Image (spheres, helix red, strand yellow):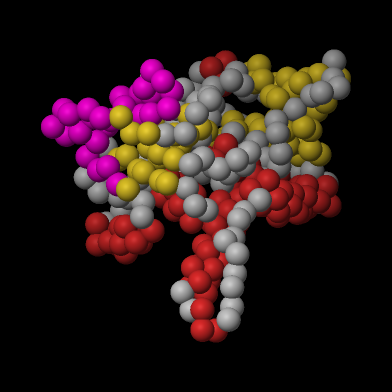
Amino acid sequence: MKNLTTTLLVIGGGPAGYVCGIRAAQLGVPTILVEGTKLGGTCLNIGCIPSKAMIHAAEEFEKARHWANNSANTPTLGIKVATPSIDIAQTVKWKDGIVQRLTGGVGALLKKNGAQVIEGWATVLDGKTVEVKTAQEVYRIACQHLVIATGSVPTELPFMPFGGAVISSTEALSPAKLPKKLVVVGAGYIGLELGMAYRKLGCEVAVVEATERVLPAYDEELTRPVLAALKKQGVVLHLGCSVQGMAETGQALRVRTANADEFALPADQVLVAVGRKAKTEGFGLENLRLDMAGRAIKVDDQCRTSMRDVWAIGD
């Protein structure tokens, strides 16, 4: 085991953690940042950036299909276009290239400003000590200030855990192949963004939402253009319906209406997009016995937790 000492230790390399690490290093504070997977966090790796890239690819594919359909209907021009197809593996590779360029920039900024990055999984032992396991060795890091920036994870339905045909937004952004029929559980912005992208890629898409309208967290008047776009694209909406779980065959989703009627919705894949929750498990947070605000860490207006010199930032 290798022992290290630093003034500031940041757990998590997402938009909160890496900005904190860069700024602290710029101010001359000895800083170590620990990240378990890739710098950039959810936003850069499996969230905002890759989703917009996939949406862009889906829109370009839709334009190609539209042109092919229109040209087939105008034979007098003498233009014939074959039915477009998409190589989803190449699309994912292109998307990953964009992500890698951005995350590489984050790493370069941390290094340029003097912050040390350790790629490994942290376990909090107490408010001043963290153990980090990397692929090569184990570090015991003593720090004066500890910043928890572990971000969030997709919310899992207890009766329908992720795995097999049930996927989260993470898997939806890196498909090995496109499903013929996709059912999206949740009509929030994550579910609708990905659902519309998959529809433009040629998949049959249905959305199941427990409330009576899409984007329930937003003003109804603002959601009307979204609703119109969904209907125009041919996305089938099942509003005011609850999910009961997968059918025994594993090829359909059991859905219950407000009238307690049940039906099976055919699905090759089910994307569960019912929200995200703070990542507060799996790294020894319970050893600090911090005050909590529900499932999140309770902080004041300066992001201080209930323990001195321990801070929590980000999602």
Q: Residue at x 32, y 39 (%)?
A: 208
Residue 192 at x, y = what percent?
A: 41, 49
**Magenta region: which residues?**
237-263
Q: Is 260 contained in the magenta span?
A: yes
113 displayed left or right of 82: right
Task: Report whether residue 41 is seen.
Answer: yes
Residue 164 at x, y = what percent?
A: 53, 25
Task: Report whether residue 3 is seen.
Answer: no
73 displayed left or right of 220: right
Q: Residue at x 48, y 79 (%)?
A: 74
Residue 189 at x, y = what percent?
A: 41, 50
148 displayed left or right of 31: left
Q: How many marks?
A: 0
- In the picture, residue 246 is in which quadrant? top left
Q: Is 9 contained in the magenta span?
A: no
In this view, the residue in front, 302 or 238, is 238
Residue 132 at x, y = what percent?
A: 74, 23
